[in-house]
Amino acid sequence: MQKLISVKSASNIILTINILALFMHAMILLEILPYHFVWGGRVNSKADLLTLETISIVIQTIFIIIIAIKAGYLFKGRFGRTVNVCIWVMFGIMVLNTIGNLLSISSLETMLMTPLTTLLAILLFRLGTDRTNRPV
């Protein structure tokens, strides 16, 4: 896989997807986009929506920071081992998220988010297998 995509390219793709997802969650929270297709279509109230979307935004922001560190955009040359552990945790979360998307009652979430989370898992696997143990 190391010859198929560079760590830098994988990082940039992950950052782009996560930044777009961050904006999507913000638009859902601001009620610009409907919330029926997120969280497996199981959001029951505005209070639930506020809580779940706030959690999404916080997690998305943490993911962006971790990948930005790996790519060398933040704290260049620092936190190598910690970032690598976080990338493997993110990989696990994306695998579980993919399974959750497949089980979603929202067909839109299943059709759109399953391939996206699968792609993220593959790209995170690429970052996790990088042997340099330092940012790109």
Image: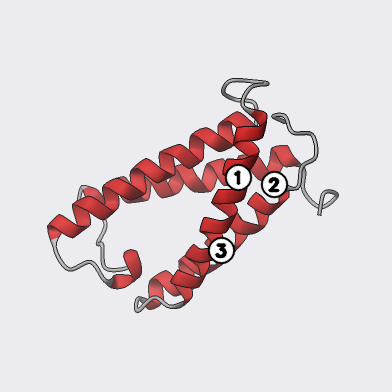
Q: Residue at 57% across / 32% down in the picture? A: 68
Q: Is residue 32 visible?
A: no
Q: Is residue 96 left or right of residue 118?
A: left
User: Which quadrant holds residue 41?
Assistant: bottom left
Residue designated by label 1 = 87
User: Given the image, on which type of amino acid does mark 2 rest?
Assistant: Gly
| SS at badge 1 | helix
Looking at this view, name the residue that lies furthest to the right: 3
Provide the residue designation for mark 2.
128
> Element under label 3?
helix
Q: Residues within 10 Å of mark 3 (few under 14, many from 20)?
A: some
Disc 2 on helix, strand or loop? helix
Residue 34 in picture, x, y percent from top left: 24, 62
Q: Are marks 1 and 2 in contact (CB under 8 Å)?
A: yes
Whole-angstrom CA distance, mark 3 to mark 2, is 14 Å
Q: Label 3 belongs to which residue?
A: 95
Q: Are marks 3 and 1 in contact (CB under 8 Å)?
A: no
**Which amino acid type is marked by label 1?**
Ile
Q: Amino acid at mark 3?
A: Val
